Amino acid sequence: MYDPLKSYSPGVGERYPNSYWFNHSGPAPKQSNKLQKDIEVDVAIIGAGYTGLSCAYHLATEHKIKAHILEANQTAWGCSGRNAGFILKSTGRKPYARMIRQWGESVAKDIYNETCEGLETVNQLISTGIDCDPQAKGYLRVAHKPSMVKVIKAQAKLLKQLFSYDVEYISQNELKTDYFDSRHAFGAIRFADGYGVNPLKLAWGYQNLAIRAGAEIYTASPVEKIISIDQAHSGAGSNTRSYANSDKNNYRLITPEGIVTAKKVVIATNGYTPYQFHPSINNRMLPVLSQIIVTRPLTSAELSNCNFITSNVVMDTRALKYYFRKLPDNRLLFGGRGAINGKDAEDPYYADRLLKVLKSSFPSLSEVKVDYSWSGWICMALDDLPHIVKGDAQGNLFYSAGYCGNGVSFSVQAGKRLAQQIAGQAVPNLPLYNQSLPKFPLPSLRRVGQWGYFQYGKVKDRWF
């Protein structure tokens, strides 16, 4: 499997993985032709996932700027088409309590409000007619051991007091009676606004919106190199000039069969960013594999035996989290960490490990089989936050990355904010938008550090 820490290219026109989503989403929309000539554009976006599609859509609809998207493989070939489909009011994995300690309550509130706006942005786009199989609203964060009950109660208390976010505590007995009966669930807090969707159909919906708005998408067109054009004579050193005055080409993007010359460039590749792709993002991300299995459809008796009533999306409190949901056809989707290296991604050990955990959680499902298994790269940031910022001094190149596995909804907000920055508009004065992704120390040892964290997580989740 493609490994972003080792490969300079994710491929050219690679097919979608054999996932549940791909096999239950109907025919894919017609993919655009690959780039086979040299072109000059106003805005070039690298990556046709949620972020890139949202950026192109908002550039067209809110700023009357046409964008051209360059995608190495297919639309949503990366994490946008491989994730579990959890639409949550969240971003990154940095707890609000840590934000308050670092930046104060005011900044924490503003970041919370930004996540609220991000969720509303997704809801508005879906309401335009995107068919993505949304399920009943509700997100459960489950205490995986008794000692974590006080932790989730404290989280609920903070959210209510600071943000007036009405989070409901559910006891272990209520969880068993009204949601599901798991041996690894000792209580939960429930967020009423999270829900599950088919993430690939959602991305295809964004693709249709972007194209109808005027964006152009080139698939099977990987960017192999980004070359800066000397702008000294153009006065491009001013950080405050508007888009309207940006009349000079600033970058050349080299693809296998064509060169794109662009005034503005957006890197929207997140966890699928190739190795040493551009100085602005090199050594600032840790791609981590997340593994998902989907069972065969469960019988009525099997669902009854574990009292699996809910269609709410579920995530536990482990450092090495497990997440799951009941799909519309009564299959169970179950996910967690995968292999460390891309070369081990297809090893059946990781799917078997997830199935073992699923069966230990629901012993009555001891005979259940897996129909689908796949993995995908999420992008971890050193500070546990995404950053949507300019990647050069002139403000002609931007990137968005570091969603930490929580980007299904916030990546769309990120695309919207990227569009504003490209158009020369101000965005909220938040660490998300005014601080670059921090570099990893000793970046060549990132995989070693990841392995060490996994070992620590195993001990913490069981004993602490």
Image (cartoon, rainbow, N blue to C red):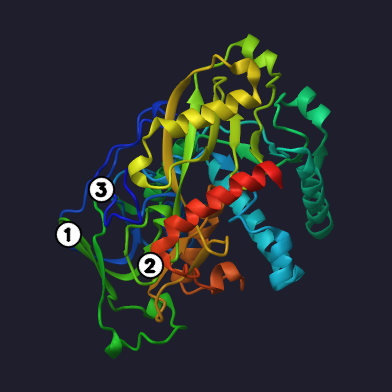
Cβ–Cβ under 8 Å for marks 1 and 2: no
Q: Which residue lies furthest to the top in this view?
A: 301
Q: Nearer the viewer, mark 1 or mark 2?
A: 2
Residue in front for this viewpoint, 131 or 22: 22
Mark 2 crowdedness (10 Å alpha carbons): few <14, some 14-19, many ≥20? some
Q: Where is residue 444 in the image (x, y as percent from the top left)?
A: 38, 64
Q: Name the residue under label 1.
A: 258
Give the number of the disc on residue 160.
none
Q: Position of residue 66 (x, y in %)?
A: 36, 61
Q: Tell me the distance, in whole angstroms, between the alpha carbons under discs 3 and 1.
A: 16 Å
Q: Which residue is drawn at 70% across and 38% down?
A: 144
Q: Is mark 1 on a helix, strand or loop?
A: strand
Residue in front for this viewpoint, 374 or 105: 374
Q: Where is residue 405 in the image (x, y as percent from the top left)?
A: 53, 49
Give the number of the disc on residue 11.
3
Above-or-below relation of 424 to 388:
below
Left or right relative to 162: residue 334: left
Mark 3 crowdedness (10 Å alpha carbons): few <14, some 14-19, many ≥20? some
**Does residue 406 appear in this view?**
no
- Which callout, 1 or 2, points at the residue further toward the start of the chain? 1
Q: Which residue is drawn at 59% across and 70% down?
A: 431
Q: Is mark 2 on a helix, strand or loop?
A: loop
Q: Mark 2 points at which residue?
A: 282
- Which callout, 3 or 2, points at the residue further toward the start of the chain? 3
Query: Three-letter amino acid code at disc 1?
Result: Gly
Q: Position of residue 320 (x, y in %)?
A: 59, 45
Query: Three-letter amino acid code at disc 3?
Result: Gly
Residue in front for this viewpoint, 93 or 219: 93
